[in-house]
Amino acid sequence: MNFTQGTFLTSALKPDEFPHLKSPSGKILPEIAFAGRSNAGKSSFINALLQIKTLAKTSSTPGKTQRINFFLIDEALLLVDLPGYGFAKAPPSEVKNWSSAIDEYLNNRPSLRMVFLILDIRREPSREDLLIAEWAASKQIGLFVIFTKRDKLSDSDAEKAIRTSLLCMEGIPIAGSLAVSNNHFYERKRFIQMINKEIAAWV
């Protein structure tokens, strides 16, 4: 896959709203989920990956993604943008609905093959970040850590921040990590190669 075609499918909160797509051969399409704190840069990263500025909605206000968003990539893969956690400015009842939807999705979605944990490189992993990482390990689902906003730090500070964050996740299997600047996604080719290698058996 080249990640040249991205189409928004649907937003959902309930399992019966989640899409179920199959390939021409009848295989369920694999899914990769993006999880992270509100304002960590998930939506911006997705747009940079697909090179479509407005595919995933972004905002300077944390908590813009309020439902689970599904995108079809190259007719072969589903990319799933989970609601951000931690800073969302929303009524408690809405936050509870998001949490329930994320829980339902993560624990009852056999087509989920990988989780990309999106971290703002300037901040250490939160409790929620570590819970996601531990959950992926317990389910034996590939976990990749993406450090966003790389351009906000010097080279030495970025290296130090990455070491510190990965040390916080010591003992948790991590399939790979990458630091990116969303405005200049020079690592895009490498990232796509990494995904293709991991999902080759399912597409």
Image (cartoon, grey):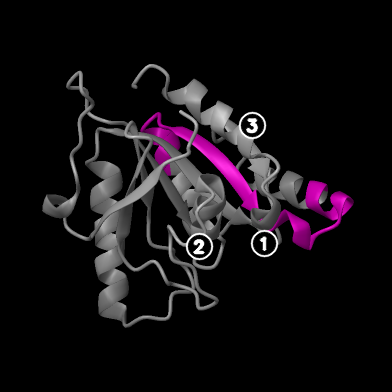
Determine whether 100 is above or below 195 in the image: below
How far apart are the two marked residues, 2 and 3, measured between alpha carbons? 24 Å
Q: Are marks 1 and 2 in contact (CB under 8 Å)?
A: yes
Task: Identify the secondary structure beneath mark 2.
Answer: loop
Task: Identify the secondary structure beneath mark 3.
Answer: helix
First of labels 1, 2 by sequence position = 2
Which quarter of the figure has residue 124?
A: bottom right
Which amino acid is tagged 2? Arg
The residue that mark 3 highlights is 190
Which amino acid is tagged 1? Arg
Residue 150 falls inside the magenta stretch: yes
The residue that mark 2 highlights is 37
Discs 1/3, front: 3
Give the magenta part as a residue range. 135-159
First of labels 2, 3 by sequence position = 2
Q: Is residue 127 visible?
A: no
Could you tell me residue 161's position as x and y percent? Answer: 76, 52
Determine whether 102 is above or below 170 in the image: below
Task: Identify the secondary structure beneath mark 1.
Answer: loop
Residue 34 falls inside the magenta stretch: no
Discs 2/3, front: 3
Q: Quadrant of the C terminus?
A: top left
Q: Is residue 58 visible?
A: yes
Query: Horizontally, is 32 left or right of 38 in the view?
Result: left
Determine whether 20 is above or below 87 in the image: above
How far apart are the two marked residues, 1 and 3, measured between alpha carbons? 24 Å
Q: Residue at x 42, y 72 (%)?
A: 64
Q: Quadrant of the N terminus?
A: top left
The residue that mark 1 highlights is 123
